[in-house]
Image: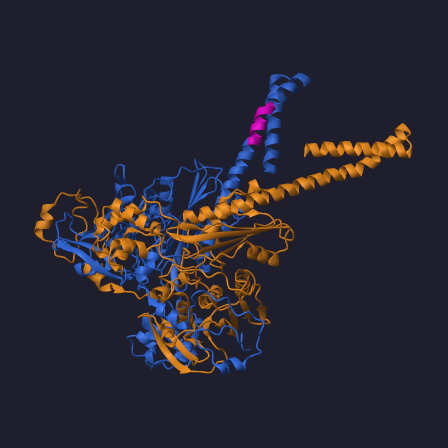
Chain colours: A orange, B blue
Amino acid sequence: MAASTGAAVLPEVPPSIEDDSEEPLAAPAEPVRKVPARRATAESLAEKQREISVSEFFVKNRHLLGFDNKQKALLTAVRECVDNSLDACEEAGILPELRIEIRELSEERFRIAVEDNGPGIVKAQIPKIFGKLLYGSKFHRLKQQRGQQGIGVSAAGMYGQLTTGKPVTIVSRTSPQAVPHLFEITVDTRKNQPLVLKEEKTDWEKDHGTRVEIEMEASYKKGRRSVDDYVEQTALSNPHCKVIYTAPGSETVIYERAIHELPEEAKEIKPHPYGVELGRLMRMFQDSQERHVASALKNDFSRMTPKVVDDILKIAGVSPRMRPRDLDTPATERVHKAFTKVKIMAPPTNCLSPVGEPALLKGLRARFKADYYDAVTRPPAVYRGNPFQVEVALAHGGELPADELIEVFRFANRVPLQYQASACAVTKAVLSIDWRSYGMQMSKGALPSGPMVLMLHIASVWVPFTSESKEAIAHYPEIIKELRLALMEVGRRLGVHIRRGKREAAEAKKRGYIDKFIPHIGIALTEILGLKPKETDKVVANLKTILERSRENMA
Amino acid sequence: MAASTGAAVLPEVPPSIEDDSEEPLAAPAEPVRKVPARRATAESLAEKQREISVSEFFVKNRHLLGFDNKQKALLTAVRECVDNSLDACEEAGILPELRIEIRELSEERFRIAVEDNGPGIVKAQIPKIFGKLLYGSKFHRLKQQRGQQGIGVSAAGMYGQLTTGKPVTIVSRTSPQAVPHLFEITVDTRKNQPLVLKEEKTDWEKDHGTRVEIEMEASYKKGRRSVDDYVEQTALSNPHCKVIYTAPGSETVIYERAIHELPEEAKEIKPHPYGVELGRLMRMFQDSQERHVASALKNDFSRMTPKVVDDILKIAGVSPRMRPRDLDTPATERVHKAFTKVKIMAPPTNCLSPVGEPALLKGLRARFKADYYDAVTRPPAVYRGNPFQVEVALAHGGELPADELIEVFRFANRVPLQYQASACAVTKAVLSIDWRSYGMQMSKGALPSGPMVLMLHIASVWVPFTSESKEAIAHYPEIIKELRLALMEVGRRLGVHIRRGKREAAEAKKRGYIDKFIPHIGIALTEILGLKPKETDKVVANLKTILERSRENMA
């Protein structure tokens, strides 16, 4: 089983005679290698090994964050700022009012500003939030939020810095009594640390809130996937939010609130045992504040009743009074296996805040002139221990274009997703449905065609995006299943509607024939049989009744 | 322009009488907010802010790295190890011989091993390479390699650790004189630092090389997107590599070398001015070892001749003798703008190592029984300053299934891409071609259908994947354009082939009719006109000639 003996001895190392003579006959015909001008050795390779900072990584890989081209960069930067503003407002219980401005400074250079009436940011936190990647409050919490990682807004600033050399400007105030502060910040990409270029007290007419300005190379376009489109969709999926939007060369547009109440607040939850991997469980036990494994299980997880904890520990053969950090790998593994052998309640779902069927229908009606609208909000479900909830709304007919592929609008935690549709679990679910059985047209591998738009929303404490640019949702089977169930529900009702429409159209057509031809038959009968007008009327009426009846029986 | 005055004063802050009385009439009808049970303030939010380690980030976001499900996890882990092995062998000028083993330990638990005959890894580097994310030799170099980031293999180990609690095992030896070392390593995810559990001298029959073993939760399946499939495709796109592959429940398969020479070594290059953003240029000037900006431009970039440097600095109004680090933002910006005003040669392309048309054709012929094969290797092109090169190969007809959508095989730097086809620039390019004009069938929004397979390869010093899991290539317009050009070239030739085939089929059919019916016409004429056999033969021959000629004229 000795592999490639005799092959590829490194010439830098003086070949010892013993080595050569030990295997003189091994695979002699195998040409060893083509000698390149300078070959690497383990030692020369070692010299090149280096640590890479996460900022360097994302500068080089900025397409991972949604900065692959100038048009998308503009959208991504605005979206990251808006996500942060809306999350902060909702967490502080404030009805959000956003001001979004895009100013064109020169060709391909823009300055964006997003201003909110949120709780503001305390002074000491501003540099890290805007000048350091992977820093934030949302990463370690299981709660439905728009932001998840602590990357977005600092990456947007870093992109501005990369393309224009300019820092991000932040103004923030935490209360009418607090002094507003102004910062100018860049990221030291080699160290992933903030560099504060300016920090001063300032004047601001706002009682509290945050304003972020980023200068960047970008390109502004109207139409699909534009910032305009994004702002409109955001206003639709956040009807409690007022948005004042100024785009280059356009009048300011104000999206007024449709709802004057905040959505039900999404609660933070603890991890559910079904979604915790062995390695994570080992770490949770190491880190637990609890003295006994029984209380660690009960308090560090959701849905662990005393009886469930008891059953688990019995199955695992672990004493409830052991200290959590004293459990070794095999014991932890037994506990982990026992999770799957005990019935545990599904995770709580008050951590989710769906849009709801009425708001979905309202949104669709406002935007599309159609004949038929429908919406469904599925009950919550779970993937990898994370609760999530799927909503689907649909409009059909009316003024929607009949000859094109349908349009699909995707939302995740109320944020519109505009790119990478084909990579998204949502699209996969739509494609996996046989829409022909619901009366739509569909060819192999393509979306259905016909006068229809679909709107799909996934709300979750953790949306598994396929990349950090938050454009598409990963193909978790549980998520696709829920999407399919929702689609099939609206699909079945749509099928009934379309078939009824077809039947009605067919009936109307037949009825039309009857109405059209019977008078002529009457005239013919009158002439042939020499009937009087009254007799003719009677014969025609009879004929019509008989025909109508037979038509109904056929239908 | 004061926004939402009076709205949303935070109740924790005792409202001062002055504040209230100043704006008693502002927007009184606007309902302020629904008061949630516990509201966040700037201060309470600040307490939750935390740094996130890059390992924690990727544990939570493991779908970003290709670990979204158990089947894919197995493939990703094998691929990361193989990428590292092949890169190391080629860099050291060694013809690679790989041993890939997958052992099933129990249901859903596997132990993978990848062993190479590469240069080995020096002892001091082993912990960091396998126990720290974002550490490696490839990130800062512009060279065609399989690995790019310094994430892959440590992430594979981290996934093993997460799902089984087990460390990664590494054996490595750098020369026959060196002692082989064995390590067991895990990642301390909170700090993104290696934890060495075991380190000892060991015995190994190999002169040099590295063996990596990872135990993980996984699922092994045969068929499309399987590890089997990946190994087969890898052997195809790396004909200089010998692979010995053992899968669970299967005989060991040996893929022998088809070529006994290493591919032309891809050279490392310096960045090309056209692809350098302003922010990066600023940093390059700050970091330059050169004393004068003129020499910094000349030596830190590719394709900068003295004349080009002169022209650039003149346009920018910058003295050639300035120290690079003394250039301020406006001066650097002028230099950056001047790049675009000067004609600079395209970057060198000896950094690329395409598979080549003969090897592509060889691969296709070996794998598919078809009637027609074609391949094209495009000349190198550039995106964002990075050279890249596109290759397309195609097989048509024969035993390929005629009624299905075509199959598309994608490769990047010789690595097969098996997931996320729909998100990939390659698929986008294939879909953007009107294959009907080349004689194929195609419906809106779908791949063409017919008896065809396509193989597309992108070689680059930096492949822009849409995510860290390296499954799809981002939609850079330059890349899509090159793919389209290559596809159109093989497409046009395919069209000629298909049309010729159709014409020949039609001709054969007509000729068939002539051959079939003319004897009968002859018999009829004989009977009607009373011809002698000889006369009949002559008439029939004449008739045939005339018909053949008219058929040819029509064709």
Examine the structure image and report whether residue A73 is included in the region drawn in magenta.
no
- Residue B42: percent from the left, percent from the top? 41, 72
Number of disc labels = 0
- Residue B152: percent from the left, percent from the top? 30, 55
- The quarter holding residue B341 reads bottom left
The answer to whether residue A521 shows anywhere in this view is no
Q: Which residue is drawn at 58% across and 63% down?
A: A258
- Residue B378: percent from the left, percent from the top? 41, 54
Task: In this rendered view, identify the residue nearer to me: B53 or A173.
Answer: A173
Q: Residue furthest front?
A: A306
Examine the structure image and report whether residue B514 is included in the region drawn in magenta.
yes
- The quarter of the image holding the N terminus of chain B is bottom right
- The quarter of the image holding the C terminus of chain B is top right
- Residue B255: percent from the left, percent from the top? 28, 42
Region of the chain picked out in magenta, as a range: B509-518
Q: In this view, does B507 lie above or below A501?
A: above
Q: Is residue A516 above or below residue A351?
A: above
- The quarter holding residue A492 reads top right
Look at the magenta stretch and give its main secondary structure.
helix
- The quarter holding residue A221 reads bottom right
